[in-house]
Amino acid sequence: MSKRRLVITAVLNGATQSETARRYGVSQGWISKLMARYNLEGEAAFEPRSRRPNSSPNALSREVLDRILRLRNELATAGLDAGPETIAWHLTQHTVSRATISRHLAKAGLVTPEPKKRPKSSYTRFEARMPNETWQSDFTHYRLTHPDGRPGPDIEIITWLDDCTRHALHVTAHKRITATIVTTTFRHTATQQGIPASTLTDNGMVYTTRLAGLGRQGGRNSFEVQLRTWNVVQKNSRPSHPTTCGKVERFQQTLKKWLRAQPTQPTTIADLQTQIDLFVDEYNHRRPHRSLPHRATPAALYNTMPKAVPTGTRDPDTHDRVRHDIVNDNGSVTLRVAGNLRHIGIGRTHARTHVILLIHDLDVRVVNAITGELLRELTINPTKDYQPQK
């Protein structure tokens, strides 16, 4: 039973207002107003009046509300972001706040409840200050569809994304991402957009060999060699810390959400690439980005801001290593350089000899592991597989 009903009933049964006020811990003035309302409205006084104002001069018109719901449906159907901030960006001709849009979307039952997430304040945010200061890269998977509707082969999509402006620099689909593809796409992107000052990736073998398994962590792969040649600083995330590369991973999430929303699913890599190109054009030039100032598009910032370039030199960043091997029956040993195996001729007379290879970048010395005799000294020619004896 509500307190209003108890107070009114007590007064009607003969209790004074002062006694009732002390018993229920309320003021006599409130009891007087409550009894006056009971005399006018009867039992309606048992429930509190609605606090809704009689008029709302700032309420949105029916036309604006319909446009908000229509935009929500159109964006969601297209697989694009359809939150309050994105809708507000599209309603530039109307002065409608994000909070107002959010409230009406919730009222219309269009808000999808999400589980409680880790607070954003707990993350350490970082962001490059200039375009080309840091490029993030990663690759993800997307499954093709057979013409009869059955699931098709799994395709991998590589992305190069500018850290400062979120501009999608390069997005292509391949059967399988290799270090060669990473290097090729990086060179192609740098030719079009300029060489970046640094890159940021995870520790996948296509990006770095520093965490490779035993026996494989020797030579740099072709991508690492290319970065050193152009004096580009290479940065890698710590293992089990995916948020370090969160910008490119968030882009891939948005890309795949859009791809899955398309009415016609790709059946070939060419079809998938066509859809990717359409999304990248929409993402870079017409989709507002919530992380950018004034919800600008990535292309608007990337094309107007001055760009960073590599600074300093990586010449002191030499690659020194020691490798133990046995000369094979053909009189040669192998050495991985720039991601490819090179065969170094030693001579058949040294077949089955235990040797130590002392490597300083491309300079190699082959020493007999038992006697310490220098068997060969050479500079690797990266354009040739076999390194013949002079």
Image (tube, helix red, strand yellow):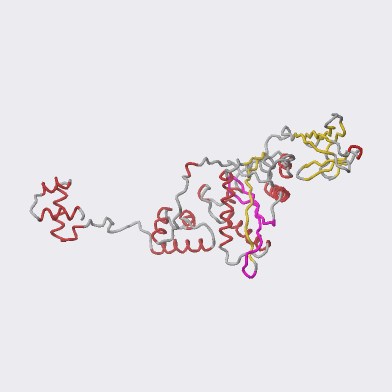
x and y, in percent, of residue 173 in the image: 67, 57
Nearer-the-camera pick, 209 or 285: 209
Q: Residue furthest left?
A: 14
| Residue 346 as seen in the image, left or right of residue 5 | right
Q: Main secondary structure of the magenta part?
A: strand
Tell whether 91 sits left or right of 32: right
Give x and y (percent) for residue 92: 47, 56
User: If the image is split into quadrants, where does the N terminus sit?
Assistant: bottom left
Q: Identify which residue, 298 or 253, lies in the foreground.
A: 253
Q: Quadrant of the C terminus?
A: top right
Q: Which residue shows up at 54% across the image and 60% down it?
A: 79
Q: Residue at x 15, y 51 (%)?
A: 31
Residue 262: percent from left, percent from top: 58, 64
238 sits to left or right of 114: right
Q: Quadrant of residue 238?
A: top right
Badge count:
0
| Rendered image quadrant of residue 326 | top right
Instruction: Please check the rendered image and state whether residue 198 is part of the magenta-colored stretch, yes or no.
Output: no
The residue positioned farthest toward the bottom in the image shown: 148
Q: Is residue 29 above or below residue 72?
A: above
Q: What's drawn in magenta, residue-wise?
A: 147-175
Residue 310 is situated, as x and y percent measured from the top left of the image, at: 68, 39
Q: Residue at x 56, y 45 (%)?
A: 243
